Amino acid sequence: MTATTSGGTGAPGQPGTVSTSVTSSSVSLSWGASSGTVTGYRVYEGATQKAQVTGTSATISGLGACTTHTYTVKAYNSAGESAGRDATATTSGCTGNPGKLAGAPYLYMGWGNPPDPGAVMDATGVKSFTMAFILSSGGCTPAWDGNRPLTGGADQQAINTIKSKGGSVQISFGGWQGNKLGPNCSSPEAFAGAVQQVINAVGPAVVDFDIENTDEFENYTVQDRILNGIKIIKANNPNVKAVVTFGTTTTGPNAHGVRLINQSKALGVPIDNYTIMPFDFGSSNIYQDTVNASEGLKNALKNAFGWSDAQAYAHMGISGMNGLSDQQELTSTATWTQIRDWARSKGLTRLAYWAVNRDRGCPGGGVTSNCSGIAQTDWDFTRITAGF
């Protein structure tokens, strides 16, 4: 039946606009009255009825802090229900889940025609970047790429721009190649001191330790040096998040990755996020392999820490590779959107990709430093990442 005006015999008209107010455990809804004969109103979340009232307001209680809910209000009478009116609200208390990091693609000022981060922010809405890479400039002395000064150069200019526009930066240490601090610093204390120089110089929100290759990931003396160094860094900088980023197989961390996780537990290192890099393993279905690898990471974290699924997901991140990877694996914009949405749905707390420099189209261009190798609009992957 169609809705009718007051005095008719059909179902009521659609309720008016719904307004909301929240606490950390409840959402209160109020709405404009429906036309027609109204017996009352029902409030649904999906297909589940959450309230039935005779007036034009209702409160849904018993909710979790910082959770998002979409409700549909319908008027009803003996003839049926009206069309629904939707409203979405998020309960307060989000500071109780401080682990969520802004989507932060890697930005590398060392090659690949580095874009102006301010222009990228304006074009995409992205609020954070992972700046790469801090290496050794000789011994235990940190420098951008091992040769650019911590302050006064292109890297600091980029960071200043990002911060001036209300953004934040994650600073990445290490990576696949180059002369790294982990093997060059003689002790956890020395490693922590080198990282502290960088924190003092550029004020990051996050320090990201890309632990890779035989010199750091597969060298357990160096693994332990970095982990014990992170413990010192966190004690001295409790408001700076600590992330470890490492490679993976299609089914989860390999033996070196499992060892890293278990050792972080054994040493009591307060790592905020364990990020895997699900690419360069010859994948023909990067979405499914990313999900499978992430579930393997979840299980490794649960085994090490005794966490629930939700606790494990809340300590997890994904760092992908846009377009074509080194092994010609394809991550399209549609696939990256799928990966982002899966990560959001599970409550993962970090999303990154390598790299903004490559977030430009060049169909058939191969694997290069300044474009993705596929057809795309400039900054498509960054826009998707910003939606995390």
Image: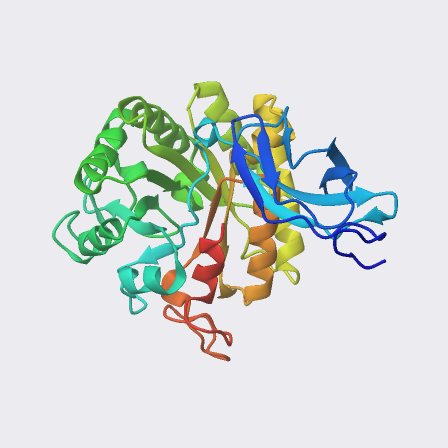
Which of these two is toward me, 222 or 243? 243
Q: Is residue 330 visible?
A: no
Quadrant that contains the N terminus = bottom right
Residue 95's x, y, as percent? 43, 29
Q: Is residue 139 above or below residue 355?
A: above
- In-front residue for pair 235/85: 85
Report the number of discs.
0
Quarter of the view holding residue 157: bottom left
The residue at the point 52 percent across, 34 percent down is 21
Residue 110 appears left or right of 353:
left
Q: Is residue 99 above or below residue 173?
A: above
Given residues 135 and 350, the one toward you in this image is 350
Q: Residue furthest right?
A: 78
Name the residue at 26% across, 60% down: 109
Q: Is residue 40 left or right of residue 217?
A: right
Can you give x and y, in whole percent of width and height, for residue 351 in the image?
48, 48
x%, y% of residue 49?
Answer: 76, 36
Q: Is residue 289 visible?
A: yes
Q: Residue at x 40, y 66 (%)?
A: 358
Q: Is residue 334 above or below residue 237?
A: below
Q: Residue furthest bottom?
A: 364
Rendered residue at 27%/46% (across/down) = 134
Residue 167 percent across, percent down from the top left = 30, 48
